[in-house]
Amino acid sequence: MTQDTTFIIRADAPIGTISPRLYGHFAEHLGRCCYEGLWVGTSETNIPHEAGFRSDVLGALRALPVPMLRWPGGCYADHYHWRDGIGPASDRMVRLGMSCDLQVEDDNSLGTHEFLHLCQMLGAEPYLAGNVGSGTVQELCDWLEYCNSTVRTKLARERAANGSSEPFGVRLWGVGNENWGCGGNFDAVTYALEYRRYATMMRHVDPTVELVACGLEEPRMFANGFDSSWNAKLLNTLGRHINLVDHLSIHTYWVDGGPQTEFSEDEYYRLLDEAEAMEQNVVRTAATIKEATGGRHRIGIALDEWGVWHPEARPWGPRGTAVCQSPVTYEQANTLRDALAAGIALEGFHRQCNVLTLANLAQIVNVLQAVVMTEGPHMWLTPTYHALRLHQPHLGATALPVDVTQGSSLASGTRAVSATASHSDSGLAVTLINRHWDQPATVRIAGTGSTGKASGQLLAADSPRASNSLHQPDRVAPVALDVQGDGHDYRVELPPHSLATITFQLSR
Ligand code: AHR
């Protein structure tokens, strides 16, 4: 049976700007993300690279694009001492690389200069996550001074001696990571007092930085005993110093979709529902911020880790589903289902673009919901990569509401076909998702204001379980979508479990 859906684009009621920061990524020293996935070093490798970073991966990421990149963790950040990663590579200390229960040798060959060079090569804004768990205020202030100082201090001269006479001007700084858990098991009030000290001193070093405080808004974590009033306690403890917070970080992982590839229809919908529900974490966080600030100070929400985390890539439940590899590599399959889930999340980002100020998909290469996978000298793109790429026209554009005048619903009550729209100087873009497991959809789009050319790209496959691999790198890849239209109303046919973006030239 084909479903019929009609959308009306509301160009008359713009929501706000979709900051490119909502399309950020996350690179942690975890498993094969940073080492191997991004960084192969400048010696002893046959893999083509630019200044130590894999050329194939760079090419893919440049095309995505990657507007912002968070590093070096994650849980790793609260063990990271930035001085270990500067200076001649041969002098760098091999440290215990610790994140998520992994213990590996970390030779620190990918350090501050290398990471910031990667950001320059990608055109990405850097976002550095500072160490609160095992660091000091002075250590983080020194890192900030080293990166940003325009005054010729000893640290700035050391930076110049290490290759960068110009300051890096890093604006985004995280003050710890998940400090309610791996980042030190703080309680909210103690973390707030620590945060106040860190943020005060960091602002003295560079008043222009944007500081990200560690928050928590995740019902799954509350069910596991974590403090459901962490955000309120943190902000209320800061009191008149609340203006030290520019962004409040929350993390959301979808963990309830059953096996990574052999999921059932029920599990398919469960994962999509989790992705849909993530928006409510943002909405609740915004309400807490509003209550605490009384609207007198703007604090954005930083969803600086999000995505799917399948049982095969973690050593913990729920539902007893963990199929722990030993050791856990944090690598997982990435199917068309995961790509649709990412698309659903992005619909929410667009709707919340006035309160959500940045977001980072976890993680960028090889680990968790990676957009790129590598195996030795080979690389392939995941379905999630393609889903993000199809969202490219929305970056920096103005989000528009989309009304549904006709359309069927799924058992969970969500629409079977959903849409997000935006307009910019280059035209109007509409991204559609047919969430239905096995039914195609005919979709009509009105209110585009376009009498010009429309073109579409479709991401689909014979099964939502389809993924790409070393041997089948293009099983899930975009193809052209036929768009029928009379200059005002347009029509497309979407196969089941598919995502498509249609771009319309606007009439002048
Ligand atoms: O992304 C993997 C881990 O998930 C991060 O290190 C941590 O912040 C989160 O718990």
Image (spheres, rainbow, N blue to C red):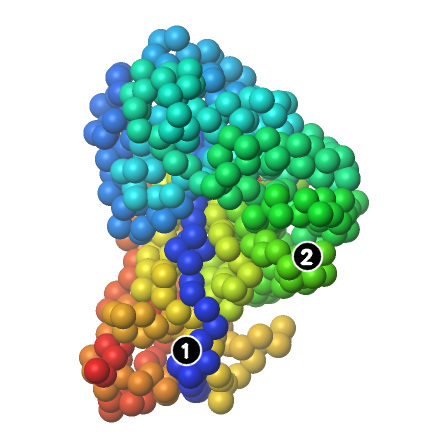
Q: Is residue 400 left or right of residue 355?
A: left
Residue 356 is situated, as x and y percent measured from the top left of the image, at 53, 58
Q: Of helix, strand and loop, which one carries label 2?
A: helix
Task: Say if disc 1 is inside 8 Å of ligand 1.
Answer: no
Discs 2, 1 touching: Cβ within 8 Å? no
Residue at 53 percent across and 83 percent down: it is 408
Q: Is residue 289 left or right of residue 70?
A: right
Q: Looking at the picture, does residue 40 appear above or below residue 424?
A: above
Residue 371 is situated, as x and y percent measured from the top left of the image, at 38, 47
Q: Looking at the picture, does residue 67 appear above or below residue 463?
A: above
Visible in this render: residue 374?
Answer: no
Q: Which residue is mark 1?
A: 440
Residue at 25 percent across and 70 percent down: it is 426
Of 48 and 150, nearer the camera is 150
Q: Of helix, strand and loop, which one carries label 1?
A: loop
Mark sitting on residue 293 = 2
Name which residue type carries label 1.
Answer: Pro
Name which residue type carries label 2.
Answer: Thr
Residue at 42 percent across and 58 percent down: it is 19
Of 392 and 382, nearer the camera is 392
